[in-house]
Amino acid sequence: MKAHEEAEFRQYVAARLDRLRRTAFLYCRDWHTADDLVGTTLVKLYEHWRRAQQAENLDAYVHGILAHVWLDERRRPWRRERVVEHLPDQVEPATPLPDGDLLALLAELPPRRRACLILRFYCDLSVEETAEILGISPGTVKSQTARALEALRGPAAELYDMTGVPDNA
Amino acid sequence: MRDLLDEAIGASPASTVDIDRVVATGRRRIRLRRLAMASPVVPAAAAVALAVTVLGGSPTAPTNPTPIQPGAAASGAAPVYDETPEETQQRLADALTDHLAAALPGATLTAWPSGEAGVVITANDDLTRYEGSVVLTTNDGANQLIVAAEPGGAPPSPTPPPSGIAWLTWVESCSQLTPPVSEQTPEGYPVTTECEESVGADGQTIVVLSKICDCPGQAVTLHREAYVTWTNARVVVGINNALKSGTPGATSLAALLLTKEQLVAIASDPELTVAG
């Protein structure tokens, strides 16, 4: 990568880092994991920076990388266990989901459905862009998004009311 | 919905994403990919290098590209890389950038004379010389650094470099120097030349020249060059303190931004060679 390209890369990252971290946090609900996901995403972006710059929507391209990094990472066995500094003395009972805890509700969604919702409503990507990223049809994006919103509707009806479902969802 | 999600996320904690580490890792992966494409032998080596990087847990540790014909240990031969001239330029620029980032964290690198950000290496038409110059700017001041790499080992006789950036005749031994009777700065302060010779870990010959001004109140190293001669390649890296030439008090700093050891480490790096 030439020096001016690297400067552009750094400039882009500086401008988008916070948004990427917050998006990653929506996927995994853990800031350390979110930063790992973003770091991996940015290395991939650096590797393909020239191609990425030719993308019609660079942000969509990057959010696509992030979504796939998350989907790939969560399949890995070591992601199923968490390293903790101290073992708890006793097992804590499962905490029921508080009504209206949007992040907890989001975490209950199947991964691709969660990705649809995040890409559509947090990253502001179109149905077509979301479909391309996830390798599914626009119709599937619409149905997955509708189901995701439906799942959120019961426990957080007010959320659904405030959100509404766009015509093309 | 976006506002609701943002509200649910709350404030972001301080980021642990290290962009310098991202760039260093990205560069290494690009180099490994190039090597994998260049030679059918390399993918295994590349995979090993990648595994070592991951297992070692030190993503910023330098990983040299694997040459197709490594220089024999301690024989003084530089490694030979199978690459295009453009890839050679990029390899040299990457290696120099990595060295400077490690030695001068936070320094701004500006290619000279183009003014582009970073390090730019150019080649002459017959690919017998790759060279670049970069202005290093830190909070302490600025220096100019030059690098020139040529294939072919020691020249038959010390000759001036064929093109413009290096400012000294090629030096393979201190005995080649004929110290001027008197040398002085434009302001009239006396300048002495110090020469040191050594042999590098890979058998390469290293000569370091330092021009030191006996300026009022302090000795100032005006510039320093490290000449490294391999059996099949030669490299010079120099750093110049006299950025403000022509102005009163021609030196920028009391001390160069790179130590002698750092300069020698850069010039001795096999990754900065273009062996032929």
Image (cartoon, coloured by chain):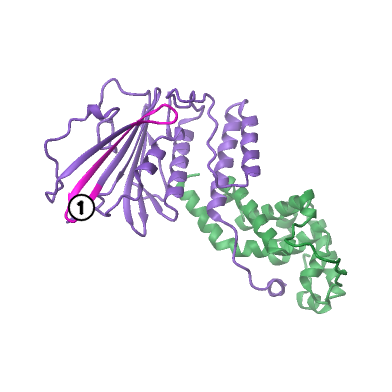
Q: Residue furthest bottom?
A: A158
Where disc 1 sits, the SS reads: loop
> Quarter of the image containing the N terminus of chain B?
bottom right
Q: Residue at x 64, y 34 (%)?
A: B48
Q: Residue at x 74, y 51 (%)?
A: A73
State the residue in front, A13 or A36: A36
Q: Residue at x 58, y 62 (%)?
A: A16
Q: Residue at x 27, y 54 (%)?
A: B254
Q: Amino acid at mark 1?
A: Ala
State the residue in front, A128 or A8: A8
Q: Is residue A38 above or below residue A97?
A: above
Write down the region rendered in magenta.
B198-221
Q: Residue furthest top?
A: B156
Q: Is residue B24 above or below residue B164?
A: below
Report whether B105 appears left or right of B171: right
Report whether B161 appears left or right of B184: right
The residue to which callout 1 is attached is: B250
Q: Is residue B38 above or below residue B255?
A: above
| Picture coordinates of residue B153, whole percent (x, y) | 37, 24
**Chain letter of the green region:** A
Q: Chain of mark 1?
A: B
Q: Is residue B212 magenta?
A: yes
| Picture coordinates of residue B270, whole percent (x, y) | 45, 32
Report whether B263 appears left or right of B159: right
Residue B211: image quadrant is: top left
State the residue in front, B87 or A94: A94
User: Is residue A125 in view?
Assistant: no
